[in-house]
Amino acid sequence: MSSVQNSTSCFSGRFCAIVSAGLVVLYLIGLARVGMAQIVVRDVNREYGEEQNWIILPYVFRSETFDTSVGVFGVISKYPQEQSTLYATAFGSANGSWRALAGAYDLRIPGFDRLFFSPTLLILTTR
């Protein structure tokens, strides 16, 4: 009986070690994103337009989980700030599941010149 308990605790110990190592790797990947240097080079002799770039793309896909799904993706750059980008996507499936995702890249926090954040919101239902 004690050998069964030892093998079970050994398995859970290995499992915990693997999960912990995975979480550390994900954390380090997150730090790499935050710590990456970003450089914007501009030619001071050239006039830059303030035009916003945007795109809207419909899409269709099929999977075992969602069956047939139809969705739309949209992105707009330089809104609401010059360096930022907003994006959103949503899709619904034939089995009644749906997903919606919206977020932004590089929103500058008011009052700070070099402090940015990139929020993401995911709303979903699965049937």
Image (cartoon, rainbow, N blue to C red):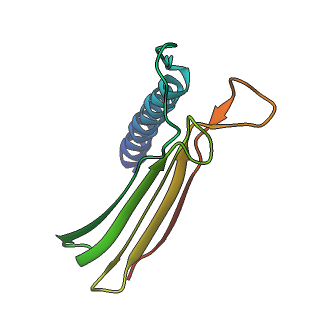
Q: Residue at x 77, y 28 (%)?
A: 112
Q: Nearer the viewer, residue 78 or 93?
A: 78
Measured as percent of width and height from the top left, residue 54 is found at 41, 52
Task: Give coordinates of residue 10: x percent, y percent.
Answer: 40, 38
What residue is drawn where x is 62% and y is 41%? 81
Relative to 58, say whether 27 is above or below: above
Q: Position of residue 12 (x, y in %)?
A: 43, 44
Taking 16 as reference, is 97 left or right?
A: left
Task: State the image quarter where residue 29 is shown.
Answer: top left
Q: How many marks?
A: 0
Q: Is residue 47 left or right of residue 63?
A: right
Of residues 104 and 33, the one nearer the viewer is 104
- Tell me where residue 7 appears, x and y as whole percent: 36, 42
Residue depicted at 49% across the width and 35% down the height: 49
Image quadrant containing the C terminus: bottom left
Which residue shows up at 40% across the image and 76% down it?
98
Question: Where 7 falls versus 66 (above or below)?
Answer: above
Q: Is residue 90 among what the camera can see?
A: yes
The reply to whether residue 66 is visible in this rendering is no
Location of residue 57 by image quarter: bottom left
Viewer-proximal residue, 50 or 125? 50
* Relative depth, front residue between 78 and 38: 78
Q: Is residue 76 above or below residue 60?
A: above
Using the image, determine if residue 115 lies above or below residue 109.
Answer: above
